[in-house]
Amino acid sequence: MFVIVGQGDVPLYEASLNKKQEAQSLVITQYFSIHSSLDVIDEKLQITNQKELDMFFKKVDRCYDQDIYAFVTATNIKLLLLISEKTKEENVNNFFLEAYENLNKQLMNPLYTLNTQITSQRFDEAIKQAAKKHLNL
């Protein structure tokens, strides 16, 4: 599951990256895991000096057998990835960089209103293609 959370913890985008259909209870657990990791990220942001801030937060949380990775932009938009497959951090970082590039393109679109849900089909396809390319999903 991949989620983009905007300023004020407003959900902007979400995508299930798994090929198989998941049970409703598992999806709810995944949402809970991702939203609870927002607190961990906020704590790290407060502790970390802005000059030392790295956008890729690596593994911020683990819930059951799934890892949660985070990427925080300079404008405090959070990209969160919940993944159960064993994946190299370099591949996760490359996925985040490609997702960030697509996010920037979306944010610069004059027809997009900032901090609102992203509904672009092209954006959705680009994220899923990046996941397939970097995460083998």
Image (tube, rainbow, N blue to C red):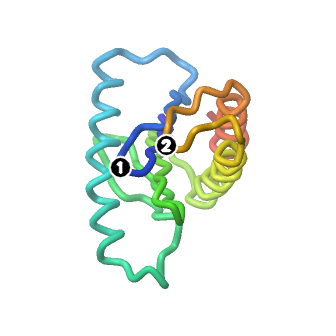
Residue 121's label in the rendered image is none
Residue drawn at 66 percent across, 56 percent down: 97
In the picture shown, does residue 50 fall above or below 105? below
- Quadrant of res 102: top right
Q: Secondary structure at mark 1?
A: loop
Could you tell which of marks 1 and 2 lies nearer the N-terminus? 1
Residue drawn at 39 percent across, 41 percent down: 10
Residue drawn at 36 percent across, 78 percent down: 48
Q: Secondary structure at mark 2?
A: loop
- Seen from the viewer's position, the closer of residues 63 and 51 is 51
Residue 129 in the image: state x and y as whole percent: 72, 34
- Quadrant of res 113: top right
Residue 99 in the image: state x and y as whole percent: 64, 47
Q: Are marks 1 and 2 in contact (CB under 8 Å)?
A: yes
Query: Mark 1 = which residue?
Result: 8
- Seen from the viewer's position, the closer of residues 18 and 108 is 108
In the picture shown, does residue 95 fall above or below 137? below
In the picture shown, does residue 47 fall above or below 108? below
Amino acid on which the number 2 mark rests in the picture = Asn
Residue 115's label in the rendered image is 2
- Seen from the viewer's position, the closer of residues 95 and 89 is 95
Amino acid on which the number 1 mark rests in the picture = Gly
| Image position of 88 (left or right of 11) | right
